[in-house]
Amino acid sequence: MTSSGTREPVILDATELTSDPDLGVRFAESAHKILTDLVRGGAALGWVEPPSRDEVSELLDHVISAVHAGDAALRAAYLDRRLVGLGYWLRYARPTHRPHADLEKIAVDAAAHGRGIGRALTAGLVADARRAGIEILTLDARGDNSNALHLYRSLGFSEYGRLPDFVAVGTGRYDKVFYMLDFRQEE
């Protein structure tokens, strides 16, 4: 990462991230802080309670191992060498679904919202999926997450299904919305 004092985010892939010893050491801790703060604030990231440090560390180790096996992509966004966002996709494990992948998490530090970081992370992951030969990139999102749904549609994703009131957070119920980006349409 070359910039210091930059106001534009620097988006790194897993190789760039893990090749910088300083960033690599702090990555899991910084990611844990972002995810914990977002979940405490009610973000739709798949947890009701903030994840533990160990849970985040194990998740990131799994994703990085999958990246090395060609079964995932990971992107991290930095402002002035401070992690402000991350996202990843994983290839489906079922043999009949191997040509496809699922965009599982996009998380941006609340203090950095509105700066295009989520868009840059998602666009980078979409480009990674194309390069990896993924045929269909899927994702699901909570139906009340209108900013995320707008972002996904603006990047070419289309809704292919919805489960009404499927996501339970306390007494609240939210739709689970399914999106896909079919790269086969581009050929």
Image: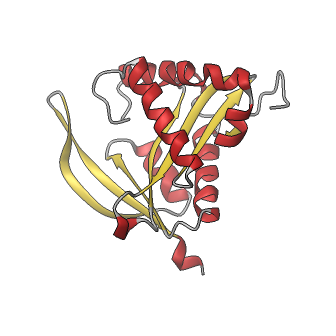
Q: Position of residue 86 (x, y in %)?
A: 56, 35
* Viewer-nearest residue: 9 or 75: 75
How are the residues colored?
Answer: secondary structure
Camera sees residue 13 = no
Q: Residue furthest left?
A: 171
Q: In this view, does 69 lie above or below 159?
A: above
Name the image quarter holding residue 91.
bottom left
85 vs 143: above or below: above
Query: Considering depth in this image, is 177 or 129 the residue closer to the camera?
Result: 129
Horizontal side, residue 120 vs residue 55: left or right: right
How far from the left and from the top, in percent, is residue 183?
A: 54, 71
Residue 6 at what x, y percent from top left?
81, 27
The structure residue drawn at horizontal position 38% and vertical position 30%, both measured from the top left corner, is 43
Report the residue at 76% width, 33% height from top: 8
User: Is residue 32 shown left or right of residue 112?
Assistant: left
The N terminus is located in which quarter? top right
Would you identify the image quadrant in which residue 53 lies?
top left
The residue at the point 39 percent across, 59 percent down is 179
Q: Quadrant of the C terminus?
A: bottom right
What residue lies at 50% left-to-right and 70% top-to-bottom?
Answer: 135
Q: Which of 90/7 is in front? A: 90
The image quadrant of residue 21 is top right
Residue 106 or residue 155, whichever sits in front: 106
Whether residue 76 is visible to the viewer of this picture, yes or no, is yes
